[in-house]
């Protein structure tokens, strides 16, 4: 569990954004497994405007500091 790789803000939004993120975007439905592992999910954020339970998106933490000593999140 110590081998996680967190992306930087530049790898998500910047000129060095990963190809898959450029093609698919940053939103993705969160899985039940990710929720069980502690992933944050809210009923206010959904993938592609679909408001079903299956389309709820989670918040993803990045390696980039937000300036307040907290990780930036993507939702």
Image (spheres, helix red, strand yellow):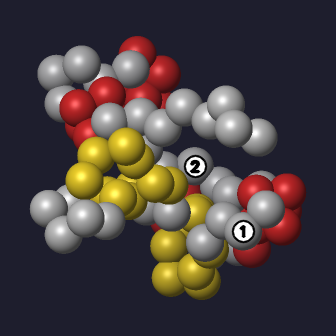
Q: Residue at x 31, y 58 (%)?
A: 72
Can you identify the residue that label 2 sits on? 28
Q: Earlier in the sequence, mark 2 or mark 1?
A: 2
The residue drawn where x is 79% and y is 62% is 37
Q: Position of residue 1 (x, y in %)?
A: 76, 40
Residue 25 visible in rendering: no
- 30 w.r.t. 4: above or below: below
Point out the frontmost of discs 2 and 1.
1
Label 2: element kind? loop
Residue hosting label 1: 38
- Position of 23 relative to 73 (above/below): above
Mark 1, Cα crowd under 10 Å, few <14 / some 14-19 / many 20+, is few
Q: Residue at x 58, y 63 (%)?
A: 57
Q: Is residue 49 visible?
A: yes
Classify 53 as above or below 17. Answer: below
Badge 2, how many Cα within 10 Å: few under 14, some, many 20+?
some
Image spot of residue 73 (x, y percent):
38, 59
Number of marks in picture? 2
């Amino acid at each position: 569990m110590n081998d996680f790789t967190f992306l930087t803000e530049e790898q998500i939004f910047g000129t060095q954004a990963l190809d898959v993120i450029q093609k698919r975007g940053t939103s993705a439905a969160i899985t039940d497994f990710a929720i069980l592992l502690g992933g944050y999910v809210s009923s206010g954020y959904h993938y592609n405007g679909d408001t079903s339970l299956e389309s709820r998106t989670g918040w993803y933490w990045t390696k980039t500091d937000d300036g307040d000593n907290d990780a930036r999140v993507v939702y």
